[in-house]
Amino acid sequence: MADNHTLWADVQLLALHAPELARTLRPGQFALARDPTTLDPYLRRTLWLYHIEGARVAFTLPARDPLVVRARVGDTLDLLAPLGRAIEFDSNARHVLLIGEGTRVAPLIAIAHDAIAQGRAVVLVTHTPFLPHSAGQGAWPAHLLSPEIEYRTGDGLDAELIAWADAIVASGSAQLYRALADAVRAARYRLEPGFARVLMDLPMPCGTGACYACAVETSRGVKLTCADGPSFDLIEFANQRTR
Amino acid sequence: MSIELAPNWKRSLTLTNPLMLTGGYAPNLAKVSEPSQGSTSIGALVTLPTTLRPRAGAPLPRVVETAGGVLLRTGAANPGLAHVLREYDRAWEQSAIPIIVAFAAQGVNDWATMAAQLDSTAGVGGIELHFNPTMDALDAIRAVRAATELPILAKLDLDNARDVAADCLAAGANALVIGRAPRGMRIIEGHPWYGRMYGPAAKPLALRAVAEIRDLRLDAPMVACGGVHSTEDAREFLAAGAGAVETDSAVWLEPAVAARIAADLAQG
């Protein structure tokens, strides 16, 4: 472990020296981590990719997590990674809209950088209307973002933005995802397969499909967030019951 | 090494290693569970509890941590037997180890239908039955027995295993699995949250139940299950009277642990 500090609010940054992972991990994927010296806490923790620089891979996770509290720079973590499917944009997707809520913006940042590196225009929005008015649930701080990301706060479901976008990735609540589906249908008349993806942030105890604790019901049947996700096509998820 | 879980029955269920892995439906888990060197393999794979039709499962969250493990409440989320067979029948057919299909609690008729479908599915070596309190366990075993000659393993709750074990065998089960993860509860945001307890804290409870069943001197094999995270854990269960041992949540933490325990047990 190369770094362990609070990035903002309840978001902790863990940076690891992990050369092999730095070569293979892709935005949208995740890692499951544990302290190899103890069974407490019992489950592996989900680490969301934040940034890769050389052999250094930075992840985010909740700042109050026991793994965060105990881990010290120089410690070794046991990782299962890369897990899940990466976010891949269609080659024709020139305009990418990323919509997050509060701390759930974190997993979108690596996706933003990747899209920009591929020559796409990116707008990142912290969607604030559904956020509870409690500490740490505000908009993602602009100073944590690099200048090439066009950043907005407020209504991420703005019709003009959605009309501008060739692809959308959202990270937030079920309420956001329902509203996004409605907004896309209103702005573009229909929700096309592949147009919008949503990130599911659920406990994923095993990461291998063994436990089915992260199973979600989609229009294409029961799927696993760890193996089939963690992002799903909004069209698969939009009409399912809220959890 | 050879462990027979259906002695004196029409179809045998023979394990070459006493370590059985539970969870998933095989391919990805089997890969990470095979030792990188040598030919030692786990004894069998017991699938995720499955229903005839797909089941979305319990509302989220389905897992809550507690000291010594987790409470898990999946609501038997699974893709349904037809999907499982479509997806995995080839892998099962080619599997070097028997696949034991676990049945999640549901209607007895659905169990009978599933049993009949699996009867001729290549690679399937047995069926493991998971009951719930609303089911008549004995009727359920009889219905499955009538539908298939596959060996039946009855996985019993720890709190009543001693009371029902002999009757389950009389109804047609070939072996007992002791047992299902114990039920537990936490208060989350002022409300009770129920689930089954997985983790090291479950081991002493399961170990005691295994010893109690052993003392009944029933003429049937017994598989132990509960909190197995190491070779030492597995050996304790074998010493307490089990013929084989299932491990489940340990592979969530360390996918290769099953292979490691199996290799250790193979060495004696």
Image (cartoon, coloured by chain):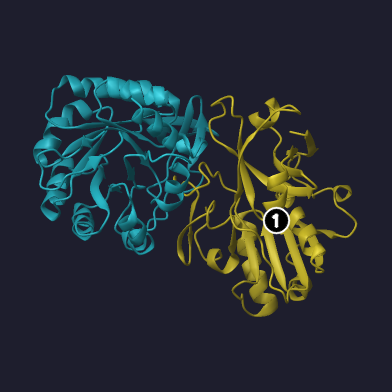
Q: State the residue at coordinates (42%, 32%).
A: B198
For the colour yellow, the matching chain is A
Q: Label 1 neighbourhood size at 10 Å, few (<14), some (14-19), many (20+)?
A: many
Which one of the lettered chains is coloured cyan? B
Q: Is residue B62 left or right of residue A160?
A: left
Q: Where does residue A87 sit, x and y in percent of width and height?
A: 66, 61
Choose between B228 and B143: the one closer to the eye: B228
Q: Give x and y (percent) for residue B208.
A: 29, 20
Apparent side of residue B251 relative to residue B112 in the rendered image (left or right)? right
The answer to whether residue A132 of the structure is visible from this angle is no
Quarter occupied by the C terminus of chain B: top left
Q: Position of residue B220 (x, y in %)?
A: 15, 32
Viewer-side residue, A34 vs B190: A34
Which chain contains the residue that carries disc 1? A
Residue B158 place in picture, x, y as percent? 28, 28
Q: Secondary structure at mark 1?
A: loop
Give the residue number, with chain letter if any, for mark 1. Answer: A27
Which is more toward the observer, B221 or B215?
Answer: B221
How many marks the image carries: the answer is 1
**Residue at the spot x=48%, y=29% of the render?**
B69
